[in-house]
């Protein structure tokens, strides 16, 4: 988030507004994740993106240190593999499971231990930029369930789990 920005200038608390959207260069995906976790408490997270940057992983590291992320599942695009591999050591310290698939979506799904759900569909990759990005934020359970089923299918049937591949590679060495 830009230092002069306040998230409340763009989004209202989830319980006050189940459907929200913004277009701004002031907010980052990590800002929204942090904002949701502070409202819902401990949550499991599913994130899809084309690519990821060291800056986002570093921000996620500090978010996870808060103890609010119980598990983080990440799907990145095959075409970003070189960048992903350069960040692999750091990714494995922060993200529980990482998958590669033919993926250009940017979806963030969050489910609390109490079953509350939030879906965020955004234009932003997991990178830092100073460009305008847009997002829709909703607590609609039907939207979460639809996206969750599709991401679950992407993970189970159309992706390569990097964690398993690296473990096999190490075992065969």
Image: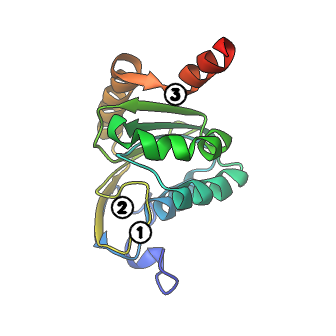
Residue identifier under label 1: 12
Image check: 1 left or right of 48?
A: right
Q: Quadrant of residue 113?
A: top right
What is the residue that sits farthest to the bottom in this orientation?
A: 4
The percent coordinates of residue 69 (x first, y second) are 62, 45
Residue identifier under label 3: 162
| Within-10-Å neighbours for mark 3: few <14, some 14–19, many 20+ | some
Which numbered disc flags the more N-terminal residue, 1 or 2? 1
Give the number of the mark in front: 2 or 3. Answer: 3
Above or below 19: residue 27: below
Q: Quadrant of residue 134?
A: bottom left
Which numbered disc flags the more N-terminal residue, 2 or 3? 2
Residue at the spot x=68%, y=14% of the render? 171
Could you say which is closer to the camera, residue 6 or residue 156? 156
Q: Can residue 111 be seen at all in this image of the molecule?
A: no
Image check: 101 left or right of 47?
A: left
Residue at the spot x=56%, y=47% of the render? 87
Q: Helix or strand or loop: what does disc 1 sit on?
A: loop
Above or below 92: residue 129: below
Residue identifier under label 2: 17
Image quarter hosting the C terminus: top right
Q: How many marks?
A: 3
The percent coordinates of residue 130 (x first, y second) are 37, 75
Residue at the spot x=58%, y=41% of the render? 88
> Do residues under tags 2 and 3 come within 8 Å of each other at their CB atoms?
no
The percent coordinates of residue 53 (x first, y second) are 49, 55
The percent coordinates of residue 149 (x first, y second) are 34, 26
Q: CA distance from mark 2 to mark 3?
A: 37 Å
Q: CA distance from mark 1 to mark 2?
A: 6 Å
Above or below 71: residue 61: below
């Amino acid at each position: 988030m830009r230092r002069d920005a306040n998230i409340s200038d763009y989004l209202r608390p989830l319980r006050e507004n189940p459907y929200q959207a913004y277009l701004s260069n002031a907010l980052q995906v990590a800002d929204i994740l942090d904002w949701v976790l502070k409202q819902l408490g401990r949550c499991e997270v599913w994130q899809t993106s084309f690519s990821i940057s060291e800056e986002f992983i570093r921000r996620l590291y500090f978010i996870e240190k808060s103890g609010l992320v119980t598990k983080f599942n990440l799907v990145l695009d095959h075409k970003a593999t070189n960048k992903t591999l350069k960040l692999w050591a750091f990714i494995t310290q922060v993200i529980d499971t990482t998958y590669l698939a033919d993926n250009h979506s940017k979806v963030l799904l969050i489910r609390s231990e109490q079953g509350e759900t939030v879906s965020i569909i955004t234009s932003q990759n997991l990178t830092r930029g100073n460009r305008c990005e847009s997002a829709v934020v909703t607590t609609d359970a039907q939207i979460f369930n639809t996206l969750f089923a599709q991401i679950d299918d992407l993970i189970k049937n159309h992706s390569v789990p990097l964690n398993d591949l690296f473990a096999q590679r190490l075992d065969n060495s």
